[in-house]
Image: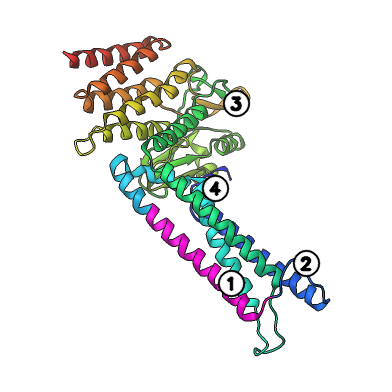
Amino acid sequence: MRFFVLRARESFWFLPAVFGIAAVVLAELLVTVDQVLIDHGTRIPFLDALSASAGRSILSIIGTSMLTVAGTSFSITISVLATTSSTYGPRLVRNFLADRANQIVLAVFTSTFLYALVVLRAVRSETDQGSGFVPTLATHLAVVFGVLDVAVLVFFIHHIADSVQITTLQKRVQNDLLAAINLIYPEDVADDTTTATRQPALIDTAPVPSKSDGYVQQIDLDELRDIAKDAGCVLDVVAMPGTFVIPGDPLVRVSPADKITDVLKKVQEAFTFGTARTPHQDVRFALQQLVEVAVRGLASGTNDPYTAVTALDLASTALIPLLTRPPSATALTDGDTATVMVKWPAPDDLIRDVFAGVTTYGLEHPLVIDAATRLAHRLLETAPNSTELILRDALATLNSSRS
């Protein structure tokens, strides 16, 4: 359920669908209320009665203009975003899709169109079959929606102008990285997790194969723990989030092997695949996005070292707490027994990824060298011995490039 919510959160269809259904229901409800008021001869104060032609004109203008505004606004936005993503990375398009403000704006415009369309269907003139009917309350509310939509359009223009700025894009990527780190490397280790010192030895294992190809985007670890508990086995996760698999590749190894038939289908359903990596459980990809923005800023066509400097400064906010927290959990437990084994990236691997990008592409830019040196010194203040060696090697490379 949690993974469905995450996918819905990043889709452009969910909120417009919800708002659209609500608009249709509200329109039918108000049309019914208008009919009841007319049948009882009740007049609503401050609302002028409308002719059928006036009601149709108002609703037609509101409906068509809102749909036109929605289509034009988002076509221009996608064009601007395509230019921005080609400069700083196509994977940043996901941030645009996940932007709640963009989803709400599209939902407001489309739901106003649907509301006006449903109310327009109820308008009847005296020359039509039956008596004339103009839903006064529903029509005036459509006018209110139209006025509010103008305010939403102004907000949308401001929001888009702000969201396509590189600093805003970098901040969103940093937020994704922080969320992934807080999930995988929490400050407090939960009671249902443990470290490698308590992992059982796995013997007599059988693989659970993948049924499809794609990147592992999500793994329902709680579901895997329940499966292992019910079957009385241990599940060793082989394909962690971010791994690309093809049909037949092992997802999990089951121990003992004779439990494979009991857990095969359930384990496969606990994995979510997609055509691209996502940062929710894939902390390495979350960091890769920040490094990619920095590297693309150093490209000859862009030549923007300040973007790389900002990316390195933002990376320090995430990496420094990472070195002070307990190691990531390597097993989920059922009481005192480890039931699900996992292999999250080590902090040393993440730090190598950052400095590998800098030392490969940024040694010709003094500003980037200074920012990377500043990051290394910050990390050295809290780094353990193994990480300290990596940082000193990176510093040696950076210092040699100055000469």
**Rendered image: mark on residue 4:** 4
Q: Amino acid at mark 4?
A: Phe
Disc number lying in front (3 or 2): 2
Q: Looking at the picture, how far across and down is residue 189, in whole percent? A: 57, 21
Q: Looking at the picture, how far across and down is residue 278, in whole percent? A: 42, 40
Q: What's the CA distance linking mark 4 and mark 1?
A: 39 Å
Residue ID for mark 1? 58
Front-most of residues 230 and 194:
194
Asked if the residue under mark 4 is in contact with the one under mark 3, i.e. CB atoms within 8 Å, the reply is: no
Identify the residue shown where x is 65% and y is 90%.
127
Q: Residues within 10 Å of mark 3 (few under 14, many from 20)?
A: some
Does 143 appear above or below 40?
above
Q: Is residue 58 magenta?
A: yes
Residue ID for mark 3? 192
Query: Which sits earlier in the primary sequence, circle 3 or circle 2?
Result: 2
Residue ID for mark 2? 45
Identify the residue shown where x is 66% and y is 79%.
51
Give the main secondary structure, helix, strand or loop, of the magenta stretch: helix
Q: Is residue 345 left or right of residue 3?
A: left
Highlighted magenta segment, given as a residue range: 50-77
